[in-house]
Image (cartoon, grey):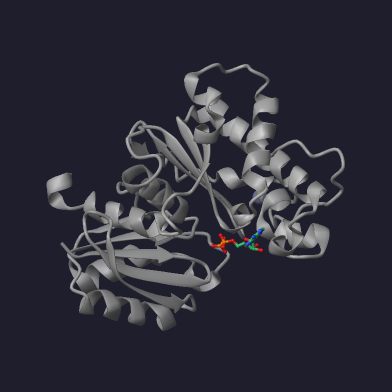
Amino acid sequence: MRIGALEAGGTKMVCAVGNESGEIFKREVFPTKTPADTMPDMLDFFEREKVEALGIGCFGPIDPRRDSPAYGYITSTPKLAWQNYNIVKAFEERLRCPVGFDTDVNAAALGEATFGITRGLKNSIYITVGTGIGVGVYSEGRLLHGMMHPEAGHILIRRHAEDTFAGCCPFHGDCLEGLAGGPSLEKRWGKAGALLAGEKKVWEIEAYYIAQACVNYTMILSPERIVLGGGVMKQPALLPLVREKFTELMAGYVKTPRLEDMESYITGASLADNQAVMGCIQLALSCLPSER
Ligand code: ADP
Ligand code: ZN
């Protein structure tokens, strides 16, 4: 089969074609401008490639609930040109094939759960620590939506005793994303994350925040594994520090075999930055008539 995948991001649109095994044959990237500028290129690409279904993992907030009147829309995004834009309808009308739709991080969680490091587990989460912080939740074998979809990058956490940075979330100031997203590193320390390697305090504070988030998600969602991806996690010192802090903050309260194997419980992403695209393939497959 020829399955289309669209990882729709705030800066770029990754369009790909693959098959049901998650193999990707073709990929093209378009900059995210306005719908009028960007949609024609993407529509032409998928039409030319004759895809039989399409999965979209989209920046948000979006409405991913099929029974909702706003299904398929990008809703209150700060990217104004895309606000209240029905991206699903645009593809359905032109391609006349089934279209699956979810958030970009839910797609990444699904990619790992179908083809990657959380394959075979019914409960896992995928956290991206990049420009923003987002969490995809795979619970009891399906992606969690609730009234919309989780926005677990904006949780409120305890501040590190030595951190005086106000936080940079435009809505909450010092929520998790405001204290630990990539831009917060740059604003707090005056240099981009990649240039802060070797600065012990930087990564101690960063790990403290990410570990708190992992504790909260563990307590609330009870995942069997946590996957940490995104640009900031490319900092090699960070993952071991997160595991260390996590164990300390959990204080032995939850005792399961999974938590005894911390390297396997909190792990890096496994699909070489293809996790969201591969998740889009699975989103497409799961809306084919035979799968319903
Ligand atoms: P996005 O979230 O925009 O899709 P990424 O997941 O690549 O993109 O995250 C980008 C963020 O990651 C930027 O804030 C960047 O400074 C940060 N980043 C990239 N590489 C590193 C690194 N090696 N160490 C720390 N931060 C990094
Ligand atoms: Zn926030």
Seen in the image, is 214 located left or right of residue 251? left
**Looking at the image, which residue is at 66% across and 54% down?**
181
Q: Which of the 4 image quarters holds residue 155?
A: top right
* Residue toward you, 185 or 119: 119
* Residue toward you, 106 or 263: 263
- Whether 167 is drawn above or below 13: the answer is above
Give how far across and how far down residue 100 sits, in percent: 29, 56
Give how far across and how far down residue 62 sits, in percent: 44, 55
Please count the marks in the image. 0
Give how far across and how far down residue 119 sits, in percent: 34, 40
* Residue toward you, 176 or 20: 20
* Residue toward you, 214 or 220: 214
- Whether 191 is drawn above or below 284: the answer is below
Q: Quadrant of the C terminus?
A: top left
**Looking at the image, which residue is at 57% across and 18% down?**
254
Q: Which of the 4 image quarters holds residue 219?
A: top right
Q: Is residue 72 visible?
A: no
Q: Residue furthest left?
A: 290
Seen in the image, is 17 located left or right of residue 229? left
Q: Quadrant of the N terminus?
A: bottom left
Q: Is residue 14 visible?
A: yes
Seen in the image, is 282 located left or right of residue 178? left
Give how far across and how far down residue 200 sits, in percent: 80, 48
Task: Name the quarter showing ligand 1.
Answer: bottom right
